[in-house]
């Protein structure tokens, strides 16, 4: 009987049995369902609202030593600005103390000769002090202060009915994200970070259990082949992981209002590739690591931290030193972050999507080959 | 004396459990060093060599002078000359350049007449933070150009100007902000993984019940279990601080007492949380998963990369539970601002509170979570 069953048919039967077993395991033990759906949901909600680089209502100290009409118009400009929450201080010492104790992030200081210098056309100085500890935030604050200053200059000269003596003005157009909402680029990046975690945890945690309990060996003595076991394990978790992925994409689109300008199918295709990479990474970790302690450290070291710091999710890769840029090529999340930011904000830009997708495809193939090789070796 | 003896014996055993295995020894030493070096260089918001495209339709001297200002800036690198409008889109879409500077055909003529001449920049806004910083750099280059041009032509400049100074970090290097943060980040990772497995490992091997029936009191077990995490954390933390100062040249302006008080209390809270997770877990796998589920939000919502002040109020309230939040303020305060112990009191006591509560809970769970 059995020799009449063709090889393909046998494979098909064994795979079906394996997948059925995995499904039952998934349904009976809610932990993998929780990792696939609850974890991304909670993390995206928490981080989607929590992670933002847009400073609003920056606490600012205003020190006016000699109040007059000129200073009133300038301080009024700061008070009307959405970016600042100004507080008046009577002298610079009090304002500097407030800066030291973090009550304000910056000081705008109009000395007592400001009004008369301005009227005399003497290029009056506006003193600005910012807390530079968070350099990025300090730069942004400086930029906002500059913006208020320029608008004020323009209004002053318009009111006096003359042109502002500025040789060159800079007009800017920000493509893809004219409102400069940082969440529009952080949330697609977060999807990549969260999916790296989910994918790796799904397999690393769930498959490792099979090795621990010795049931992997039990499987091995059945007629099923190694690659059939691996594919049988990957398919159910792939379906679960893609479910989680769709959930996060839907949340990004409708909960956080990130525009999705590329096509859904491109997104689905590249997500599937990335999911394969993430699951493969988890599987490889669980096969390679002999002890849980090492497995855990390795999982944190190779998944979360690189996806967070080296993927371009928040820190720009092109500003990193060349050696570190080379290392980022080993981080799969890097390619997915580039794809997601482009698909969400810019659209289907094929050269970019294809280049990054091929990198993901290559990595997933390398992982699959390594997994097959190492899984056999581990049993020997 | 016997208490000390008990604790010492248990702590020795715990140390051996972690350090016996060659691989886990390596995991404690190798990865933190490698990560410190890679992340220390990678995690920066500063932009240099921003790829810039130039589209100059004017061939006068003024436009050439303006462009030479961009060429001279360390922040920009001109990588492409654009000849036609249609070339701009693929350049920005494909991320070849972050910015394109467009000078219109009558630019020099306007400048010579003394009129205001507009130039246009097109910026890739996919990363809005990078876009905003690049735009700020471009603005300051144009401001600088204007000042020189007006000075030479004897025109009056604008009636008021800004004199900007940055305290504590006068060159605004974001590495000075990020690397003290990495000290906290890596210390947390190492401590959490050591402690999160310590009880779960024994539960899995069924030796924890044996430990509970020995004459050791729960407090002694708790201290014995907490000690290795604290000691290894202090050593790792000191090493990372040393590298930050010696290798990365981060100024350490405050005193070490304030820093180490912070490190001690932070480790207390990290060890407490780790032991709490561990005593809740039945298997090492659950312990690891728990550590992971604590670690990820603790890092992302700590103010490590994105300021807590930008978060909505609900999330801000949640960050009060995060020990890393307080330690980052201590680290940055002591490193850059030279903050004293008195100024940091509001950061110390919440960490102590989190540490004591979680340790107490862990001790209670030792006895009450049985299988």
Image (cartoon, helix red, strand yellow):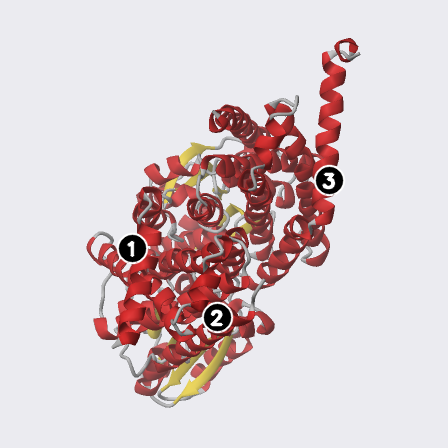
The residue identified by callout 1 is B152
- Measure how far apart labels 2 and 3 are at the Cα level: 35 Å
Which chain is disc 3 placed on? A
Q: Nearer the viewer, residue B154 or B242?
A: B242
The nearer-to-camera label among 3 and 1 is: 3
Residue at 64 percent across and 34 percent down: it is: A234
Residue at 22 percent across and 52 percent down: it is: B247
Q: Tell me if B136 is positioned left or right of A260 in this view.
A: left
Q: Quadrant of the C terminus of chain B?
A: bottom right
Q: Nearer the viewer, residue B27 or A347?
A: B27
The residue identified by callout 2 is B362
Residue at 27 percent across and 73 percent down: it is: B4
Instruction: Indicate whether B92 appears above or below B41.
Output: above
The residue identified by callout 3 is A23
Instruction: Indicate whether A20 appears above or below B234.
Output: above
Q: Position of residue B91 (x, y in %)?
A: 52, 34
Q: Position of residue A36 (x, y in %)?
A: 66, 48
Can the viewer see residue A111? no
Q: Nearer the viewer, residue B269 or B136?
A: B269
């Amino acid at each position: 009987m059995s020799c009449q069953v063709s090889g393909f048919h046998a494979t098909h039967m064994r795979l079906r049995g394996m997948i059925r077993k995995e499904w039952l395991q998934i349904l009976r033990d809610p932990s993998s369902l929780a990792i696939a759906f609850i974890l991304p949901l909670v993390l995206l909600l928490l981080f989607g609202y929590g992670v933002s680089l847009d400073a609003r209502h920056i606490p600012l100290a205003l020190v006016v030593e000699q109040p007059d009409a000129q200073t009133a118009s300038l301080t009024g400009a700061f008070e009307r600005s959405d970016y600042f929450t100004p507080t008046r201080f009577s002298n610079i010492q009090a304002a500097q103390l407030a800066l030291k104790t973090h009550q304000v992030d910056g000081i705008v200081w109009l000395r007592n000769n400001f009004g008369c210098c301005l009227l005399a056309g003497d290029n009056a100085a506006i003193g600005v002090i910012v807390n530079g500890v968070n350099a990025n935030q300090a730069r942004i604050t400086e930029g906002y202060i500059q913006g208020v200053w320029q608008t004020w200059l323009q209004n002053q000269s318009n009111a006096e009915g003359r042109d502002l003596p500025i040789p060159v003005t800079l007009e800017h157009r920000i493509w893809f994200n004219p409102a400069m909402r940082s969440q529009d680029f952080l949330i697609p990046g977060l999807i990549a970070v969260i999916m790296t975690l989910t994918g790796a945890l799904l397999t690393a945690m769930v498959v490792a259990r099979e090795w621990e309990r010795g049931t992997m060996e039990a499987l091995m003595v059945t007629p099923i082949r190694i690659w059939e076991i691996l594919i049988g394990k990957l398919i159910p978790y792939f379906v679960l992981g893609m479910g989680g992925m769709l959930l996060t994409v839907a949340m990004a689109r409708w909960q956080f209002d990130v525009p999705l300008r590329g096509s859904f199918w491109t997104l689905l295709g590249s997500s599937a590739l990335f999911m394969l990479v993430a699951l493969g990474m988890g599987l490889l970790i669980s096969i390679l690591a002999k002890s849980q302690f090492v497995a855990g450290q390795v999982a944190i070291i190779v998944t979360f931290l690189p996806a967070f710091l080296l993927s371009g999710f928040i820190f720009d890769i092109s500003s990193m030193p060349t050696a570190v840029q080379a290392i980022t090529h080993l981080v799969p999340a890097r390619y997915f972050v580039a794809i997601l930011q482009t698909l969400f904000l810019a659209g289907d830009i094929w050269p970019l999507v294809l280049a990054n997708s091929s990198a993901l495809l290559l990595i997933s193939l390398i992982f699959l080959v390594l997994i097959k090789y190492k899984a056999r070796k581990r049993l020997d | 004396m016997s208490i000390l003896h008990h604790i010492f014996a248990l702590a020795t055993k715990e140390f051996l459990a972690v350090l016996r295995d060659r691989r886990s020894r390596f995991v404690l030493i190798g990865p933190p060093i490698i990560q410190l070096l890679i992340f220390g260089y990678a995690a920066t918001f500063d932009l240099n060599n921003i790829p810039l495209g130039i589209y100059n339709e004017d061939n006068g001297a003024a436009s050439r002078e303006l462009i030479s200002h961009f060429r001279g800036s360390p922040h920009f690198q001109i990588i492409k000359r654009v000849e036609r409008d249609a070339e701009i889109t693929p350049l920005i879409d494909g991320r070849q350049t972050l910015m394109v500077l467009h000078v219109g055909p009558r630019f020099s003529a306007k400048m010579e007449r003394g009129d205001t001449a507009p130039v246009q920049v097109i910026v890739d806004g996919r990363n809005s933070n990078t876009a905003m910083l690049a735009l700020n750099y471009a603005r300051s280059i144009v401001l600088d150009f204007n000042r020189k041009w007006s000075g030479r032509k004897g025109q009056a400049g604008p009636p008021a100007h800004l004199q900007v100074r940055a305290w504590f970090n006068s060159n605004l290097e974001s590495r000075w902000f990020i690397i003290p943060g990495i000290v906290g980040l890596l210390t947390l990772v190492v401590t959490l993984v050591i402690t999160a497995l310590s009880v779960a490992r024994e539960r899995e091997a069924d030796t924890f019940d044996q430990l509970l029936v020995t004459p050791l009191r729960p407090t002694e077990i708790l201290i014995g279990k907490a000690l290795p995490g604290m000691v290894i954390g202090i050593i790792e933390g000191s090493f990372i601080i040393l590298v930050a100062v010696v290798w990365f040249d981060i100024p350490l302006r405050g005193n070490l007492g304030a820093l180490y008080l912070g490190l001690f209390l932070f480790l207390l809270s990290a060890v407490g949380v780790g032991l709490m997770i561990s005593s809740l877990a039945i298997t090492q796998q659950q312990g690891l998963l728990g550590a992971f589920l604590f670690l990820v939000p603790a890092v992302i919502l700590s103010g490590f990369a994105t300021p807590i002040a930008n978060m909505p109020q609900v999330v801000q309230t949640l960050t009060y539970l995060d020990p890393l939040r307080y330690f980052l303020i201590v680290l940055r305060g002591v490193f850059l601002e030279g903050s004293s112990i008195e100024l940091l009191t509001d950061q110390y006591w919440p960490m102590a509170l989190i540490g004591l509560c979680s340790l107490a809970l862990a001790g209670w769970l030792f006895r009450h979570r049985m299988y």
